[in-house]
Image (cartoon, helix red, strand yellow):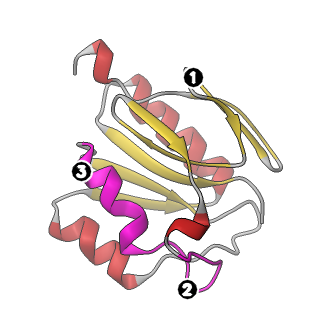
Amino acid sequence: MDEDVKSPVITHLSWGRMEIEGLGTGKDFKLWPGGGRPWDWDETGTRHVPGIQAADVRELIDKGSTVVVLSRGMELRLQTTGEALRALEAAGVAVHVEETGAAVELYNRLARDGDAVGGVFHSTC
């Protein structure tokens, strides 16, 4: 993978706060090869239940992610809809769903290995 499209590394995670290489700080993020942005749940009406929606992951697919890490929150309250998982599967994207701390560790490992990894991260419950 070219260095300019490398997935940004998450440099800090604490309750309600993430720091992303080259993107700054925020609460929740969507990340992909070459960039990312804060994740605003209101864009798609996302809530803890039913959780991450297909509309939330389409951007990751469109930005070239071949593997995606979805976080469940620090207290595992964030769910993921079947539609989101099916959208990723239909696009041929490998998916991992983990508690946020574990999701960050996995995502960073894949990013540092040069994989075209994307992710959706929630830094609270």
Q: Residues within 10 Å of mark 2 (few under 14, many from 20)?
A: few
Q: Residue at x 57, y 53 (%)?
A: 39
Q: Residue at x 16, y 62 (%)?
A: 91
Q: Give the x, y percent position of residue 109.
A: 47, 32
Q: Give the x, y percent position of residue 14.
A: 81, 42
Q: Give the x, y percent position of residue 40.
A: 59, 58
Above or below residue 15? Residue 6 is above
Do labels 3 and 2 touch, CB within 8 Å? Answer: no
Q: Amino acid at mark 3?
A: Asp
The residue wearing badge 2 is: 50
In this rendering, position of residue 48 left or right of residue 66: right
The residues tagged by marks 1 and 3 sit, at their Cα atoms, a distance apart of 21 Å
Give the magenta-colored segment's residue range: 45-63
Check residue 56 for magenta coloring: yes
SS for callout 2 = loop
The quadrant of the image that shows the N terminus is top left
Q: Which mark is residue 21?
A: 1
Q: Amino acid at mark 2?
A: Pro
